Amino acid sequence: MDITVNTLISAPIATVWNFYTQADHIVNWNAASDDWHTTRASVDLRVGGQFSSRMEAKDSSMGFDFAGTYTDVIVNHRIDYQFGERKATVLFDETEGGVSVTVKFEAETVYPPEQQQQGWQAILNNFKRYTEETKA
């Protein structure tokens, strides 16, 4: 089962792309709620390159690593990656209103699809907020 989340960001495509793909920006927006944060991130943005990020509860009660391998990269347009046995695609489409960012990913079997959709959408909403506030 695939799940899709989307947002429209009022910023230039180059800014949206850079903020989504650079580790020093990822640590500022990659969280689903205010009580979580990303403590570190690394990105080797090329086919076969690896990425990873460490997400932790701010009270240190729990955390997890999110890591994978890029399988396709088209600058300012598309990123495909594999994480574990699952796959995801991120599309960046310029529109009159800004940049539409769409993330499509294979659902896991542990948590309900609705919960996964809400979490990934919350992260994308944080990305939108961070990018629009920081783009200057």
Image: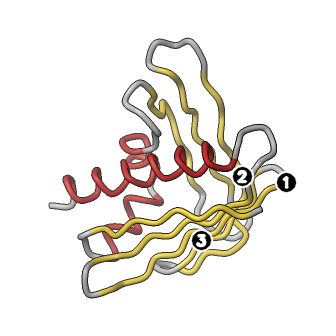
Q: Point out residue 89 in the picture as x, y percentages from the top left corner.
A: 63, 69
Mark 2 or 1, closer to the camera: 1
Task: Name the amino acid, label 1.
Answer: Glu
SS class of the residue under badge 3? strand
Q: Are marks 2 and 3 in contact (CB under 8 Å)?
A: no
Give the side of residue 128 with respect to residue 3, left or right.
left
Give the residue number, with chain letter if any, for mark 2: 68
Labelled disc at residue 79: 3
Labelled disc at residue 46: none
Q: Residue lying furthest bottom in this view?
A: 96
Q: Point out residue 96 in the picture as x, y percentages from the top left corner.
A: 26, 87
Q: Point out residue 73 in the picture as x, y percentages from the top left corner.
A: 61, 75
Q: Residue lying furthest left in this view?
A: 136
Task: Name the amino acid, label 2.
Answer: Gly
Q: Which residue is at a point 46% across and 39% down the rendered structure image?
A: 32
SS class of the residue under badge 1? loop
SS class of the residue under badge 2? strand
Crowding near pointer 2: few (<14 within 10 Å), some, many (20+)? Answer: many
Tell which circle, 2 or 1, labels the residue nearer the N-terminal end. 2
Tell which circle, 3 or 1, labels the residue nearer the N-terminal end. 3
Labelled disc at residue 85: 1
Mark 3 or 1, closer to the camera: 1
Give the side of residue 77 with respect to residue 12, left or right.
right
The quarter of the picture where residue 106 lies is bottom right
> Is residue 65 depicted above or below 50 in this figure?
above
> Is residue 76 depicted above or below 64 in this figure?
below
Tell which circle, 2 or 3, labels the residue nearer the N-terminal end. 2
Q: Which residue is at a point 77% across and 62% down the rendered structure image?
A: 1
Task: Name the amino acid, label 3.
Answer: Ile
Q: Point out residue 8 in the picture as x, y percentages from the top left corner.
A: 34, 70
Which image quarter holds the C terminus? bottom left
